[in-house]
Image (spheres, grey):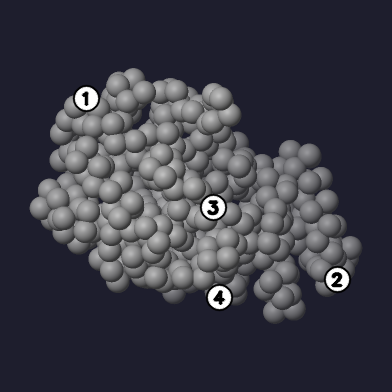
Amino acid sequence: MEEKNLNRNDLNKILRKRVLLLDGSYGAEFVRRGFKGDLPPDVLNLRDPGLVKGVHQDYVNAGADIIITNTFGSTPYKLKQSGVEEHKEIVESGVKIAKEAAQGKTLVFGDIGPTGALPYPLGEGGFDFFFNNYFETAKIMVEKGVDGIILETFSDILELKAAVLAVREVSKDVFLVAHLTFDENGRTLTGTDPFNFALTFNDLDVDCLGINCTLGPEEMLPVFQELAKHSNKFLSVEPNAGLPVLEDGKTVYPVGAKEFALHMDSYWEYGANIIGGCCGTNPEHIRQMKKTLGERSPVSREKRRCSAVSSTLKTVDFDDFVIVGERINPAGRKRLKEAVEKRDLDYIIDDARKQVEAGADILDINFGIESNVPSDFMEKVILSLVYKVGVPLSLDVQTPELLERLMKIYPGRPLVNSSRAAEEELGFKTDLVKKYGGVLI
């Protein structure tokens, strides 16, 4: 493959013609080759670039079409948690090493993982915190000439959404892959299933959706099938080499290279466009996949359209009869008005739960006189209802800047309510839905 510094249009054309092989694990390979694991593996970009380059080259020689930079933990926040301050230097060196190993024969994707912080109200992470971390990292990668960016092993859709929007703020032209990781029940850490993942990110400006880590190839397949059923994007997948087991005090991944490659044939059948490996895989796994899969054309998938909204935990399809609870509105409700004025979040959450217990599928949110309510409190209300009550929300918000902010930080696909057919208003709200996702009424 002779292309260098490709843009998303170039890669879209390639992926319509054939399936690409991604590389495998880096951390375990570093350890196997002598790394003690006392600092984040990303630091090796500065301390032992030869080790990093050697692993890259082995994946290139094994037949990988794409290698990823050794920067999984290289957001400013995550590096600082380990006492590492050289964010810019680590990311720049990571791209440089990978490009040297690729020698123009293999594509290089900048790799970015989650910060490790949970979003409010589950933790202290907020949209701006996430966005700024990913913006800084992606900016360096794009400036240094990566062919694409892959966001992998995310467990929360708000953090992943912030990362996608940050990358797109840096570049509209870079090919972008977004991954979540799921457990055996088909849920992320914060409760999202593959249908919701597809529904939410089908709206966003991302090229490829996928799954990696946590599960082996056999366990991940039904989760991938569900994603493939609902996604209208290219698809990527990186299973672990089986579920880890302890042998003589060491973590071992039991699925060997040949068995792994045979499993991956099933992913191609269900429409995977980019296929690689995660924890426990090594260059031999990629070599065997190259032998098994060769250079295949992708399998076409039927792309379904779905009119639905979601929170992190629940998807509501409008093909079904839907009940919308509309009591979170201070008009005519003295006690709720007092709760909003006093910033009594607990009362609002309790009121919302009562509506859900009474049968509401969606909750309509109206803050009354919006200029009297601080925007940060509105954000806390939205996030608390989504993560703690769990149903999708209808945003009945009329201030344009405020509506945009709440759509931006919404974890899922919201309903945007009370839109008039006036040309200017409808055009504005349609643009918001195109950028942040949602359903407009």
Name the foreground residue: 317 vs 205.
205
Which badge, 1 or 3, comes first in the chain's sequence? 3
Estimate the spatial distance between the alpha carbons at disc 3 and disc 4, rounded to whole Å. Answer: 46 Å
Which residue is most to the front? 34
- Above or below, 37 against 398 in this view is above
Residue at the location (50% across, 55% down)? 40
- Above or below, 298 against 312 in this view is above
Q: Are marks 1 and 3 in contact (CB under 8 Å)?
A: no
Q: Residues within 10 Å of mark 2 (few under 14, many from 20)?
A: few
Disc 1 residue type? Answer: Thr
The answer to whether any part of residue 330 appears in the image is yes
Q: Which residue is mark 1?
A: 292
Mark nearest the camera among 2 and 3 is: 3
Q: Residues within 10 Å of mark 4 (few under 14, many from 20)?
A: few
Q: Which residue is mark 4?
A: 401
Mark nearest the camera among 1 and 2 is: 1
Q: Which residue is mark 3?
A: 38
Disc 3 residue type? Answer: Asp
Disc 2 residue type? Answer: Lys
Disc 4 residue type? Answer: Glu
